[in-house]
Amino acid sequence: MTDEIVVIPGDGIGNEVVPATRRVLEAVAPGFEFVEAGAGDAVKAETGTALPEATREHVADADATLFGAAGETAAEVILPLRSAVDSFVNVRPARAYPGVDAVRPETDLVFLRENTEGVYSGHESRLNENVSTLTRVVTESASERLAEYACDYVDDDAFTLVHKANVMQETDGLFRDTVARVADEHGVETDEVLMDAFATHVCLDPGQFDVVVCPNLAGDVLSDLAAGLVGGLGLLPSANVGPDNALFEPVHGTAPDIAGEGVANPAATMLSAAMLLDYLGHEASGQRVREAVETTLEQGPRTPDLGGSATTADVTEAVIDRL
Ligand code: NAI
Ligand code: MG
């Protein structure tokens, strides 16, 4: 059966790293049917809406989606797209690679980030000129779905539960209690770390962490922090996973400081594509992509963010050659 993959480059370097990654997918999985769709700042400037209904429908109906990044309209695009695939977990692996300068080369962990609520549930209001508010939503059902996924992910072993329930007693209290209960029901061990303390621990000794389960905002911030430990945002892939659909994207944004120069690091998006291949059951192809990207990170050519002078196109050719 042919898999239908929606491809949304978006804005900025999304237009560089996503086409490069599509070429990699075409090289390993020629059976895919690709549907190009638009979203982001440029689409909004042209049509008045950052996320056209047709794009949302394509994503909801596809087998999987590869997304780049959207600029100022990121929240208008990525949040509805995550709900279009009913994504309750954002899987964000952060690991160092041989050959890439890393602050902490022993880093090899995965964030399982709650993906629907917390402070990103969109309940913000402006009470008056000087006062604005934000409502933080935590539900037992979303926390349970995340915890079930985490137990499955660690294959009934153990994970670290990150929260701030000492201060946000109701919201993170419910999050912590629910995740801990589900883990207990599965016989999965958890250790709990407060999210501010986690930031220090992960910098000083990332090797002690393996799988980290955390609320939405914490996962967003801490995974970017982990990117800093392993060599930068150009390296971190992610998967927004739902019950029967998923959207894959690099953790980074549109990188306006380098967009248009042709030097964006495509590794994060290519590694996201490897996760997409795994998700669709093409594990051997996923592994081939990962190995080709890893060899290229180790032996070059490398883009300027990793200290090299290669272009996105040079790296892409090298990865495809190694496939
Ligand atoms: P960013 O991730 O775009 O860039 C941060 C820094 O990392 C920049 O110096 C950039 O050059 C570098 N960088 C990121 N990806 C890189 C790559 N592949 N290769 C080489 N260097 C790379 O984050 P920033 O600057 O905070 O946001 C820029 C725009 O992106 C904003 O408009 C923001 O709203 C949007 N954004 C969108 C996201 C999404 O669509 N999911 C996620 C994060 C930000
Ligand atoms: Mg982010």
Image (cartoon, rainbow, N blue to C red):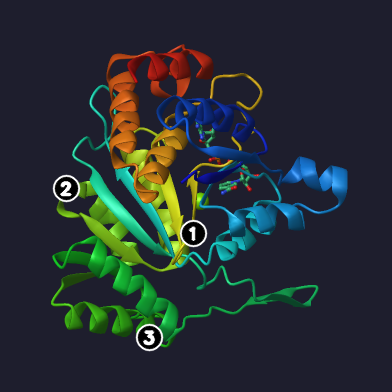
Inspect this view and state whether residue 25 appears.
Answer: yes
The image quarter in which residue 272 lies: top left
Q: Give the spatial CA distance, label 3 vs label 2.
A: 28 Å
Instruction: Give the residue pinned by disc 2.
Output: 207
Lateral position of residue 290 relative to residue 129, left or right: left
- Which residue sits at x=61%, y=54%? 59
For marks 3 and 2 on the same chain, the one whose residue lies earlier in the sequence: 3
Closer to the observer: label 3 or label 1?
A: 1
The secondary element bearing badge 1 is classed as loop
- Which residue sits at x=38%, y=39%? 274
- Which residue sits at x=60%, y=59%? 60
The secondary element bearing badge 3 is classed as helix
The secondary element bearing badge 2 is classed as helix
Instruction: Give the residue pinned by disc 1.
Output: 245
Between 295 and 103, the one lying in front of the other is 295
Please, what is the three-letter code of the amino acid marked with disc 1?
A: Asn
Q: Give the spatial CA distance, label 3 vs label 1.
A: 27 Å
Please, what is the three-letter code of the amino acid marked with disc 3?
A: Leu
Considering the image in quadrants, where does the C terminus appear?
top left
Give the image location of residue 9, x and y in percent: 63, 38
Q: Which mark is residue 174?
A: 3
> Where is 38 relative to 115, above or below?
above
> Where is 288 relative to 38, above or below?
above
Q: Are marks 3 and 2 in contact (CB under 8 Å)?
A: no
Q: Which mark is residue 111?
A: none
